[in-house]
Amino acid sequence: MTDGRRAGTTATRPRPGGTGRHPAPARRTATPSQRTRPGSRPPRTTTVARRPAGASPRRRLAAFLVVLVLAFTLVAARLTQIQVLSGPRYAALGESQRVHTVKLAAERGSIFDRNGRDLALSVPQKTVWADPRLVTDPRGEAEQLAPLLNVDAAILQARLSQDAAFVYLARRVTDAVAEQVKALSLPGVDFLDESTRFLPAGDLAAAVLGRVGTDNEGLSGLEVQYDKQLRGQPGQRIVETDPNGKHVIAGGVRDFQPAVRGDDLVLTIDRGLQYETERSLTAEIQSAHAKGGMALVMQTRTGEILAMANLKAGEDGKIGPSPSNQTLTNVYEPGSVNKLITVSGALEEGVVKPDTRLTVPYSIKVADALFKEHDFHPTQQWSITDIVANSSNVGSIMIGQSLGKDRLDHYMRAFGFGHTSGLGFPGESAGLLLDPNKYSGSSMGTIPIGQGIAVTALQMLAAYNTVANDGVYVAPKLVKATVDGEGKTHDTAASPRHRVVSEKTAREMTAMLAEVVRVGTGTAAAIDGYTVAGKTGTARKPLENARGYKEGAYVSSFAGYVPAERPELTAIVILDEPTPIFGGLVAAPVFAQVAQYGLREYRIPPPDVPLAANVPKTSPKAATGVGDVGDASAPPPPTTIAPSPPKNP
Amino acid sequence: MTATARPTARPAATAPAPRQQPERRPPLRVVSDEELLARARRRRNRLLVFLTALLVVGGLFGLAAAHVVLTQNQFKLEQLNRKADAEQAQYERQRLEVARLESPSRIVAAAQERLGMVPPPSVKYLTPAKGTTASVPSAGAASTGTAKAKPESSHEQAVEEWSTVKRQLDNRP
């Protein structure tokens, strides 16, 4: 109010006593003279006089208004264009400059043994990176960093001079190196945490655990099989930051989803027993100059694998872990250990009884092939126990023939051959079994003694475990439980099981296998104070790229369980091309060492129960000691089964 | 300004027209109740305006203060987060160190080389003769009793310990 009045007073001041009712004429003369500075322009009075009174200011006002409206229209149009039409685009542009999504990497789950001891775990390690845009002296920085990061200075300089906002300088350096680099405080050089996989027990069970790649993805073994669970779920944080993206603007956290740590695996493996198994096997590979070896230990009742060793002798003679879990991925011709299935099937079917006596000659002709014993013996009257204890090829072929190919095939499949174990391990082999309709004439000479079929070490172990477990097959188990991100433990389902042979057959078979260790081919597997049941095997090795067998190359094995009266542990030991070749001499001692350790660790006392009474003991006369070698003179089966190459994705 | 206030203010401001002053002075009159009420209303309005202004200014200051506190807390949060990250990394590193120290190869080497220990050749179990009473301590029975319990319980314990720790990892905002 007051201001308005004052303004009015100022405007009308030159006109004394004026009421302001007719301001136009007075202003026409007064205003120009007031406004115009002297000398800047010719006096306007003439122009003013020419104009008709009242028209000019109105027109000027109108023109001014039009200009004003136009100007405002332009501004409004531009505003509409920016705010409405392109609004979202500019908003997004602005947002992209200050809003950043920070990925939060999920920590990879750990792998534990059955007792909760770490087998594989991830620990964050510093990765050195740089923003070349902020680097002032690429050459100088490269020279300072090169000795610390152990990277060539020229390479570093090239990376630091790149036209990029992010370059790796060195991934996953040790904490000491990171500290040294940090102390240099070079412009543009920064750090980020990257998860790194460690196997704290070194190479222990390395082939089973598998490897993890640079970007934390499983590459082999359990790491790839359980990759989805182990990996976890990455989280993210959407934040508004300063232009460098380093400091979060106050209240600038827009969204936060925490990373969910990956599930942990609790394996059935026992780290102590695994170590002992690998140690014993390493020593044997060394002393027998073998190419490699495998060993498996299983808990009889549950099918839980306690130890899974895969070793290989390198070019330099050093023994280290195999590149793949060969106990599951590689097949081999089992040889005499397969006689377990031939004899169990025959006992179950009532074809023979433990005390049935067969007239066993030194050799037998099947179709056009002649099969012989490893060591010469005159024609003998042998009980089934004698045949098993001496690992008689001829006797086993005779038993196999009376069982027949269909029933033999049925038992091999029921014992777990010809299909995978259900572990789902990457690259696991199903083994190779011929269809009984495709058997050649001599097949019934080779298959009962374990040539002309191919199995994995795990399949053979599961077959022995079936007899140990009173005739019930239990699927092997490798993962006992998972621990989720919340720390809750989820036990895996119990292994499926099915009966293969009766308890009676299993007991009788056990008593026979105990004779193998007492007086037969497997005496080296004996453990003081316990009864061990098991079977030796010395199988010929097929040529890798052609039909037929490799001369002088054998795969020697021992499979068995202890205590025979009430089995608790089942194990198999396989050596690749050892010297001496006999499973009873090279594999059986390893079995004894491993089993003894297991018995001690699990505090298993000798049970106070007898073995099956109806099984005759091997007569001392019949025990020849070594007879489990695949017949070297026998022709190769029609389809020689070559070991399948390790298939590990 | 109000009509009554103007005449008193004029003489000081405009010196050339002092003579006009008496003529312009309005005659005294009775102020009506309505006018009084209007004045009161105006005063109230002024107070209201003043209070509103105070509130706005105060509010702005409050907002600024809150923002300062927020920023401070943000920094604190960032610091704490960084510390938690560092502590977690430290925990993981130490876990790795413990696992390495516990590895069987190291233990066996230390036991055999440094402490001169040897693996037992065999374990003898003594079975009590039939008819022995239960109260007689027996090595066989004692070890049989703990046979299965021990590995199982250590497994349970180790996994349980981990479960409590694991819940604390990676779950902070």
Image (tube, grey):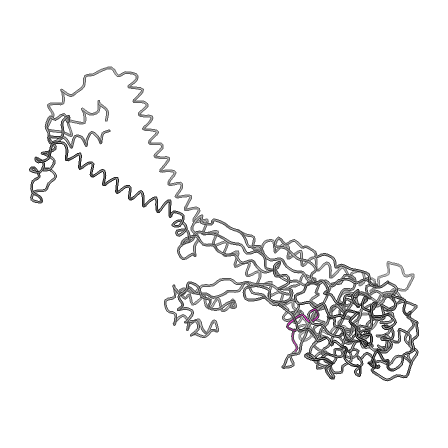
| Residue A40 figure quarter | top left
| Residue A167 figure quarter | bottom left
Side of B103 where A81 appears, left or right:
left
Residue A320 drawn above or below residue A209 = below
Side of A239 where A527 appears, left or right:
right
For the N terminus of chain A, give its image quadrant.
top left
Residue A514 picture location, percent across and down:
85, 72
Instruction: Give me the residue at 86% from left, 58% from top.
Output: B135
For the C terminus of chain A, give its image quadrant.
bottom right
Residue B85 picture location, percent across and down:
52, 57
Give whichever of A222, A360 is nearer the camera: A360
Give whichever of A52, B134 is nearer the camera: A52
Residue A611 drawn above or below residue B57 = below
Side of A537 where A505 appears, left or right:
right
Residue A150 drawn above or below residue B9 = below
What's the magenta region? A319-328
Q: How many marks?
A: 0
Residue B147 picture location, percent across and down:
78, 62
Instruction: Give me the residue at 47% from left, 63% from top.
Output: A191
| Residue A133 figure quarter | bottom left
Residue A577 picture location, percent across and down:
72, 80
- The verdict on residue A105 being magenta is no
